[in-house]
Amino acid sequence: MVMMMSKFGNNWCYSTSCVLLICCILPFLMVSGRIVKRSYADQSIRGYISERTCWENEICKEEFKNTFRCKCPEFAVCRSPGRYYSAYCSITETGYIFVQPNFGSWGSK
């Protein structure tokens, strides 16, 4: 009788550790394969109101306008939470990104 209890106890411990492994560790291993890019690049805006460089966190494109106010520095992007929101110069590349033309194409619409 004592021998059966110890066998049952070891099997219970083994099965519990398997369940913990499956429930706790496997979801973390599976997450790495499902990383999704959380940004969208819009290239529809081509012109500028003025030929100047924006400051960091300055509005580079106002909501519902079809031109940029200024050009973001090289290390920043013109980003907003969505297409119809004001966009700011930011170093964070998530959200709705308005791709700005190079210096050579300033003034063209």
Image: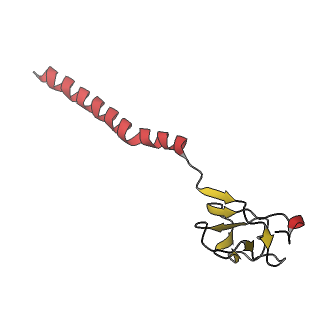
Using residue 18 as the reference point, say whether residue 39 is left or right of it: right
Colour basis? secondary structure
Q: Quadrant of the N terminus?
A: top left
State the image quarter where residue 108 is shown: bottom right
Where's residue 17, x and y in %?
32, 34
Q: Seen in the image, is 107 located left or right of residue 15?
A: right
Residue at image coords 79%, 70%: 47
> In this orientation, which residue lies closer to the viewer: 90 or 81?
81
Q: Percent x, y for residue 39?
A: 61, 57
In the picture, which quadrant includes the C terminus?
bottom right
Where does residue 65 sit, x and y in percent of width and height?
Answer: 69, 75
| Residue under the image location 15 percent in, 20 percent down | 3
Up the image or down, 74 lies above or below 19; here it is below
Q: Is residue 37 above or below residue 98?
A: above
Quadrant in the rendering for residue 40 = bottom right
Q: Which of 84/56 is in front?
A: 84
Please identify the quarter of the rendering in which residue 12 is found.
top left
As drawn, is 11 to the left or to the right of 107? Answer: left
